[in-house]
Image: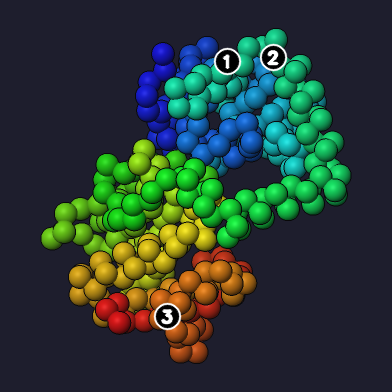
């Protein structure tokens, strides 16, 4: 039987690279490109090996920078991988091994080599269907309905009660799984911040991270508040960052509860004001912040914030908001 908990993608990267060919390791949170076969929190078992050990139709684990993703081999000459539904071709990256099993909870599904033709045929069929505009239109309609207000009672039943609270050091594994699927923040940054700043006791805590967790400890929403100087940006005060709610938990008040939790902690830490920067085209986040009393910041602060992010390589224009932490 596999272990109950699998290492996160960031944690196992160095281990995988040092692992001899032929050895196996469970890796979690790498299945975004294999949806709907894999979902957040599922794990894959990887047989260590290089590009010469796989063929078309295999599922492989690929390193892209410090990120690990599981993909389907579409071609070996030239080398090309793809998502399961063929929505996007992937080129480049380093093959770390072949996926030989999938795990969801207590269920383990092996992927033996004879399964490869069936998976390849299924992938081609899904890709052909996805290429049709009508298929994508139907999919978007179903998706929009499932994540709309009409489906909220069903989603509440499926997700269950969510506890919104400050994250602790023991929540790291669940946070990294969520981050691998939903965030662009590096796992190493989150690990360091949670261990050295956010997850400390009340007297020592600096900044804070809040999560929406279900009864099994899985994260469905996340945000943090801290100084931008932690990331090398020359901006004063504390800022709300990475407010993200998983689709299945949207329109359920989770984002508002996350912000309320962070505002209360910022006030407890003696921060008089909390600021936020939001992409100008993110209407949903803007409504959430403004619904909690955030107001547009001065032109001078907005300009400084956009200039700081421009210097860091970001191109989108930001709307800057602020409010008193206890207001």
Residues marked 2 and 3 touching at CB (< 8 Å): no
- Residue linked to disc 1: 110
Say which label, 3 or 1, has the lower sequence index. Answer: 1
Q: Position of residue 160 (x, y in %)?
A: 42, 45
Q: Where's residue 284, x and y in %?
A: 56, 69
Q: Which residue is mark 3?
A: 294
Q: Is residue 185 left or right of residue 150?
A: left
Does the rendering let one see residue 76? no
Under circle 2, the secondary element is helix
Quarter the N terminus occupies: top left
Report the residue marked by disc 2: 115
Q: Of all residues shown, which one is farthest toward the top?
A: 114
Label 1: which secondary element:
strand
Q: Name the residue rendered at 37%, 24% in the picture.
A: 4
Foreground residue, 252 or 41?
252
Separation of marks 1 and 2 at Cα, in angstroms: 9 Å
Q: Quadrant of residue 258?
A: bottom left
Quote the CA–CA distance across marks 3 and 1: 50 Å
The image shows residue 141 at horizontal and vertical percentages of: 73, 53
Decide: is 170 above or below 255.
above
**Above or below, comparing residue 252 to residue 291 in the picture:** above
**Which element is circle 3 on?**
loop
């Amino acid at each position: 039987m596999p272990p109950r908990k699998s290492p996160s993608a960031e944690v196992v990267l160095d281990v995988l690279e040092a692992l001899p060919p032929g050895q196996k390791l469970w890796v979690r949170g790498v299945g975004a490109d294999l949806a709907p076969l894999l979902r957040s929190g599922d794990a894959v078992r990887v047989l260590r090996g290089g590009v010469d050990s796989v063929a078309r139709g295999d599922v492989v684990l690929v390193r892209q920078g410090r990120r690990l993703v599981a993909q389907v081999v579409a071609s070996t000459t030239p080398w090309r991988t793809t998502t399961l539904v063929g929505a996007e071709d992937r080129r480049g990256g380093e093959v770390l091994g072949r996926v030989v099993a999938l795990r969801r909870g207590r269920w383990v599904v092996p992927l033996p080599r004879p399964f490869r033709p069936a998976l390849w045929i299924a992938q081609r069929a899904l890709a052909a269907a996805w290429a049709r505009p009508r298929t994508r239109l139907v999919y978007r309609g179903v998706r929009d309905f499932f994540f709309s207000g009409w489906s909220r009672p069903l989603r509440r039943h499926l997700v269950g009660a969510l506890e919104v609270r400050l994250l602790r050091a023991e929540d790291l594994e669940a946070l990294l799984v969520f981050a691998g699927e939903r965030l662009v923040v590096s796992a190493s940054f989150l690990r360091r911040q949670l261990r050295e700043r956010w997850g400390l006791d009340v007297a020592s805590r600096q900044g804070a991270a809040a999560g929406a967790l279900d009864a099994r400890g899985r994260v469905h929403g996340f945000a943090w508040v801290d100084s931008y100087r932690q990331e090398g940006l020359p901006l004063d005060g504390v800022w709300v960052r990475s407010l993200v709610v998983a689709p299945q938990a949207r329109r359920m008040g989770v984002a508002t509860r996350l912000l309320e939790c962070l505002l209360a902690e910022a006030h407890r830490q003696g921060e008089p004001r909390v600021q936020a920067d939001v992409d100008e085209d993110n209407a949903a986040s803007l409504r959430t912040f403004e619904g909690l009393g955030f107001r547009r910041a001065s032109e001078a602060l907005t300009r400084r914030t956009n200039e700081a992010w421009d210097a860091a390589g970001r191109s989108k224009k930001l709307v800057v908001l602020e409010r008193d932490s206890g207001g």
